[in-house]
Image (spheres, rainbow, N blue to C red):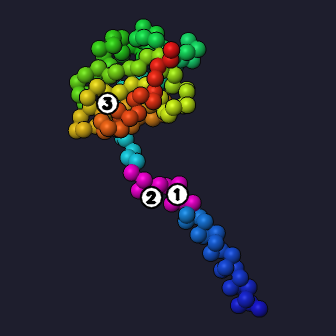
């Protein structure tokens, strides 16, 4: 009787253990190819742009249409559009004014990006995150993220 209970208890735990292992491996990604991007100067600057873009959107009730609408939300450090330069390629970030960062009908909207990037990739600020994209991926994604009419 004691041995039967022990065997029964082990049988109950095996499926739960299998579910836990599969669930954890799915949650953790198991080498999904997604790289975590550490905080670097270009990442920090893109996050500032993202924050300013969303603050302007909230205040205006629509996406900012130009730099003058975005500028008040960038803080004192970035008074000129020329201050928003990528340390990777030395060129100003392209900020896509008028992009509805809350409309995901055609994919994740691209808000800003490096003009050239470096080493075959560019940093791209989407409505959700900052990604490193190669040129082919970028060219596929950018048409899916039109500005508002």
Quarter placement of the N terminus: bottom right
Direction from residue 84 to residue 23 in the image, left or right: right
Residue 148 seen from this side = yes
> Disc 2 on helix, strand or loop?
loop
Q: Can residue 46 be seen from the camera position used here?
A: no
x and y percent of residue 66 in the render? 42, 11
Callouts 1 and 2 close, C-beta under 8 Å: yes
- Which residue is at the far top? 68
Secondary structure found at label 1: helix
Does the stretch in magenta take in 18?
no
Q: Residue at point 50% right, 34% down?
A: 107
Question: Which circle's residue, 3 or 2, is located before the other in the chain?
Answer: 2
Cα separation, mark 3 vs mark 1, equals 32 Å
| Residue named by callout 3 | 41
Which residue in the structure is indicated by mark 2? 30
Looking at the image, is 116 positioned above or below residue 5? above
Q: Nearer the viewer, residue 120 or 53?
A: 120
- Image x and y of residue 112, in percent: 39, 25
What segment is highlighted magenta in the picture?
A: 23-33
**In magenta segment, residue 29:** yes
**Is 98 in front, or is 21?**
98
Q: Is residue 36 above or below residue 127?
A: below
Q: Quadrant of residue 47?
A: top left
- Residue at coordinates 54% horizontally, 59% vertically from top-left? 24
Identify whether 143 is placed above or below 121: above
Contact (CB < 8 A) between labels 3 and 1? no
According to the image, label 1 marks what residue? 26
Q: Secondary structure at mark 3?
A: helix
- What residue sits 56% from the left and 12% below the top? 60
């Amino acid at each position: 009787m004691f041995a039967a209970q022990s065997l029964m208890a082990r049988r109950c735990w095996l499926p739960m253990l299998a579910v836990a292992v599969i669930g954890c491996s799915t949650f953790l990604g198991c080498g999904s190819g997604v790289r975590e991007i550490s905080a670097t100067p270009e990442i920090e600057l893109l996050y500032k742009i993202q924050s300013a873009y969303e603050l302007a959107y909230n205040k205006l009730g629509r996406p900012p249409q130009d730099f003058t609408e975005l500028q008040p939300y960038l803080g004192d450090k970035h008074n000129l559009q020329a201050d928003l330069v990528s340390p990777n390629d030395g060129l100003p970030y392209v900020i896509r004014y008028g992009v509805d960062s809350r409309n995901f009908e055609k994919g994740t909207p691209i808000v800003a990006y490096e003009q050239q990037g470096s080493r075959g990739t560019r940093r791209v600020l989407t409505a959700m995150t900052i990604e490193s994209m190669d040129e082919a991926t970028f060219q596929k994604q950018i048409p899916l993220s039109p500005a508002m009419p």
